[in-house]
Image (cartoon, helix red, strand yellow):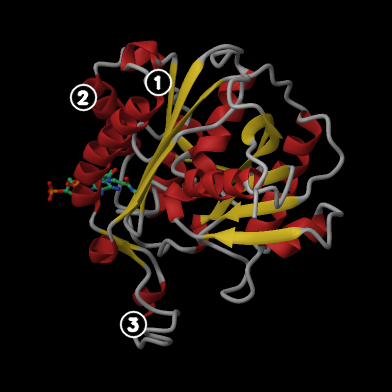
């Protein structure tokens, strides 16, 4: 069978953050932490937290609608939702997002690669386009990690926030602005325990210890691995594209910790002003972090048409990966 060969071209972007803002001072009133510790160790000043009952699907619908309108479209053929916090363990949440957008009936699939989920979902969507399965794909990263961190755990609560970000990809030519790729994607399942919710899945359905239903993170090991893998992956994707790091105008890395982004830039020899950083106001929003950073940078003018942009992520699984694109002329929409 002859498949049509199309590039996936970025055509629209949108983000959505729940209205409630929790700053470091508010957290330090109920946890043994301080604004100073959180700011200096992570770069985070505040995070947005979903209201009770406000879910991953709700946020995804908001961000997805904005991305579709930003692309000047009213519909898409397929939806890929990156999330590790679906509304229910079963079924996946993507079909409910499609219905919420008035797009019931389309291909709708969840991808769970946690904080790398958005880059993995972009690759999945690019495959749908390359094989002719879909011509327009909505890719959303949406996570509600406030439901996954134990409220008393000072090692995770200050770091994570809730939110959703989305892009629309359309079939196009590999040499036009917005064309995605190549991709560099990896995993290392032997290290799953470094960032894990032990109970609730098929391996350990229930547990007597309530903490087992919440995220446990070996932060320092994850920190070191994130530094190394994001730098390696960025070099690999640039090599594949025949580009050098000096040509990169904007590095949009997963917003887990500003010190990770700075360390990756240092290893790559990338000037720090080329980093896109919005973690101070969002915290780590997992799969939503890269598209939210894109929407923010597009909005404040730091990401402009013609910029060479690297997207790079690292997360639980472990998973990591990168891709590259020339930023197209994008208009944001409400
Ligand atoms: O999103 C995907 C993956 N996630 C990440 O990439 C997260 C990666 N990890 C990190 O960002 C960092 O490891 C953290 C921000 C989580 C922690 O920073 P760290 O520099 O690795 O700190 P640490 O865990 O080594 O702790 C240093 C000290 C410890 O005290 P002692 O033993 O030195 O007395 C901790 O008990 O800081 C203490 N500490 C805190 N103090 C105040 C840990 N958490 C807190 C806190 N407030 N919230």
* Side (left or right) of 214 relative to 119: left
Q: Check disc 2 and report its element: helix, strand or loop.
A: helix
Q: Check disc 3 and report its element: helix, strand or loop.
A: loop
Instruction: Report the Cα–Cα distance between label 2 and label 3.
Output: 41 Å
Instruction: Report the Cα–Cα distance between label 3 and label 1.
Output: 41 Å
Q: Which mark is residue 267?
A: 2
Mark 3 packing: few (<14 Cα in 10 Å), some, or many (20+)? few
Q: Residue at x 73, y 57 (%)?
A: 97
Residue 255 appears anywhere in the view:
no
Q: Which mark is residue 209?
A: 3
- The location of residue 194, given as percent across then percent down, is 25, 60
Between marks 3 and 1 in the image, the one whose residue lies nearer the viewer: 1
Give the answer, above or below, for where 330 lies relative to 313.
Answer: above
The foreground one among 128 and 54 is 128
Q: Earlier in the sequence, mark 1 or mark 2?
A: 2
- The location of residue 279, given as percent across then percent down, is 44, 33
Circles 1 and 2: CB atoms closer than 8 Å: no
Question: Which residue is situated farthest in the front direction here?
Answer: 1
Q: Check disc 1 and report its element: helix, strand or loop.
A: loop
State the image quarter where residue 223 is shown.
top left
* Side (left or right) of 183 relative to 192: right
Q: Residue at x 54, y 62 (%)?
A: 85
Between marks 1 and 2 in the image, the one whose residue lies nearer the viewer: 2
Give the answer, above or below, for where 64 lies relative to 263.
Answer: below
Residue 241 appears anywhere in the view:
yes
User: Which residue in the structure is indicated by mark 1?
Assistant: 275
Q: Quadrant of the N terminus?
A: bottom right
- The location of residue 286, given as percent across then percent down, is 47, 48
């Amino acid at each position: 069978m002859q498949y049509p060969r199309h590039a996936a071209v970025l055509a629209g972007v949108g983000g959505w953050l729940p209205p409630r803002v929790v700053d470091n001072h508010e957290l330090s009133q109920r946890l043994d932490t301080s604004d100073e510790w959180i700011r200096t160790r992570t770069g985070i000043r505040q995070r947005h937290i979903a209201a009770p009952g406000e879910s991953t699907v709700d946020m995804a619908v908001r961000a997805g609608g904005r991305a579709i309108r930003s692309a000047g479209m009213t519909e898409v053929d397929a939806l890929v939702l990156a999330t590790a916090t679906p509304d229910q363990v079963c079924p996946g949440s993507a079909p409910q997002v499609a219905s919420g957008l008035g797009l019931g009936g389309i291909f709708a699939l969840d991808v769970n690669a946690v904080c790398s989920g958005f880059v993995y979902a972009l690759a999945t969507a690019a495959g749908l386009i390359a094989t002719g399965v879909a011509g327009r794909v909505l890719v959303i990263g949406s996570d509600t990690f406030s439901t996954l961190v134990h409220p008393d755990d000072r090692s995770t609560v200050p770091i994570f926030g809730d939110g959703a970000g989305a892009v629309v990809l359309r079939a196009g030519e590999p040499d036009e602005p917005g064309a995605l790729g190549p991709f560099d994607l990896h995993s290392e399942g032997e290290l799953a325990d470094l960032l894990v919710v032990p109970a609730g899945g098929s391996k350990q359905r229930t547990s007597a210890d309530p903490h087992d239903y919440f995220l446990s993170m070996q932060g320092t090991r994850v920190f070191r691995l994130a530094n190394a893998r994001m730098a390696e992956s960025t070099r690999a994707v640039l090599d594949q594209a025949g580009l050098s790091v000096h040509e990169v105008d904007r590095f949009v890395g997963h917003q887990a910790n500003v010190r990770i982004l700075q360390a990756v830039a240092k290893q790559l020899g990338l000037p720090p002003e080329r980093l896109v950083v919005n973690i101070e106001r969002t915290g780590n929003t997992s799969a939503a972090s890269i598209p939210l950073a894109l929407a923010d940078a597009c909005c404040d003018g730091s990401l402009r048409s013609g910029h060479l942009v690297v997207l790079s992520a690292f997360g639980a699984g472990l998973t990591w990966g990168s891709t590259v694109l020339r930023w197209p002329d994008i208009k944001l929409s409400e």
